Amino acid sequence: MKREQWSSNMGFLLAAAGSAIGLGNLWKFPYVAGSNGGAIFLILYLILLILLGAPLLLTEMAVGRATRLNAIDACKAIHPRWGFVGAAGVVGAFVILSYYSVIGGWVLKYLFAYLRHSSLGDADTYYTGFITKPLEPVLWHLLFAACCFGIVAFGVSKGIERISKIFLPVLLITLIGIGGYALTLPGAAQGLRFLFLPDFSHIQSFSDLGTILVQAMGQVFFSLSIGMGTLITYGSYLDKQANLQKNAVMIPLFDLIIALLAGIAILPCVFSFGLEPSAGSGLLFRSLPYVFDHMTGGRWLAIAFFVLVFIAAVTSAISLLESIAAFFIDRLHWHRISASGLATLCFALIGVANSLSMGVWSDFTLFGMSLFDLMVFLSDNVLMPIGGFFLCILASRIWGFPKLLQEISSNGTYPVRFPSILRWILRWMAPAMILVIFFVSLF
């Protein structure tokens, strides 16, 4: 069976950027940056994006393109006993999808709610009342899962690439528009100061600086979904003459731009209404709906915002679904519709349980966590770090750095600058950083 390919490198870039740009860019990055010294965090984040993010993305793309296989079989092709590296990523993708789709369903619910009503009433009551219902959140989750299936089932170029070419420009334009409006609000400058001005009160000792450094490392790692195997899968569809080095710079750069624009769009709104900045679902489904309901033209801004959030969620979700479906297609030679259909069915069923764990099953816990929180913990704190750590070892030591370098350079077409630094990063620095993230997140 002939392997599918991206129709253009730009199509790949937009799809890969869509994979990296997710809910974390919108509901976590602005708060984490502002709460960790503003510009101090941003400078450290940018450095780590270059030293940690880009090399690991480059490695994933190289492994995928060299083997032309899904994440599990790509790692097995390098060494028969190292398939577990790709398996950690594929299992992680499955786990993430099982709760990410639930949140995606919430986004759709809020989008349609604002299309029907000018206000949601009390934001806290509305949110709590919705997520604890036994049936409605499940139906929205299944609708989001069906959207993902519909895109992936159409294939790489006709599904994922085509949607990414439409959605990513819309996301960027919408975010710029919301940001421009947010800057006109009274008190907007306070939100910008929170994000961009250096706050040295956060650095009273080397320990404080270390804490900010670990936060920045974790944000780079989780924002780019390193270790999930998505870029191995996406890389396997790349043309042999594509410039991997350029792509490895452009993807995190676009991810950073979107994260900063999200901060410019969100934080001025929050500060303008005297709310405390927060992260996660509290920001997305409580604070911001309160803001939208109390501002002039807020309904239309809310519609634009939740369209934006839906795009960010679905472009990330389809990359995860593709990494799972690709395994069934490569290993079992299934038709794409069957492969993506089974993968969707499996994560959707677990997603139903995750959704119910917020309401009627809230009393059921494992290790002191709800099923939803347990899935988040497993993906973020266990599977992603394990996948990223062993990917560094596999690519730089088991496969061998010369072979990796040859693939990165497209057989010498694009000479690799500073190869000795790249070797040191992949062999020593990146694994050490990942171990730090792993143990800090656990303990």
Image (cartoon, rainbow, N blue to C red):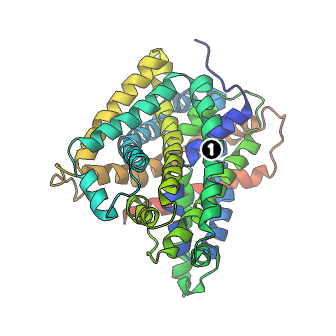
Q: Quadrant of the C terminus?
A: bottom left
Of the pair 283 and 300, the residue shown nearer to us: 300
- List x then y, in percent, for residue 82: 49, 35
The amino acid type found where label 1 is placed reads Val
Q: Name the secondary structure under disc 1.
A: helix
Residue 255 in sight from this viewpoint: yes
**Residue 99 in which image quadrant:** top left
Q: Quadrant of the N terminus?
A: top right
Identity of the residue drawn at 79% across and 31% down:
411
Identity of the residue drawn at 68% across and 39% down:
13
Of the pair 14 and 203, the residue shown nearer to us: 14
Residue 396 in sight from this viewpoint: no
Q: How many marks?
A: 1
119 vs 191: above or below: above
Of the pair 207 and 239, the residue shown nearer to us: 239
Instruction: State left or right for residue 33 relative to residue 384.
Output: right
Identity of the residue drawn at 41% across and 55% down:
118
- List x then y, in percent, for residue 331: 47, 20
Q: Which residue is the extreme one toward the top?
A: 1
Instruction: State left or right for residue 404 relative to residue 83.
Output: right
Instruction: State left or right for residue 205 relative to residue 95.
Output: right
404 vs 236: above or below: below
- List x then y, in percent, for residue 182: 59, 66
- List x then y, in percent, for residue 333: 48, 14
Residue tagged 1: 170
Q: Residues within 10 Å of mark 1 (few under 14, many from 20)?
A: some
Of the pair 103 and 418, the residue shown nearer to us: 103
Identity of the residue drawn at 42% across and 53% down:
380
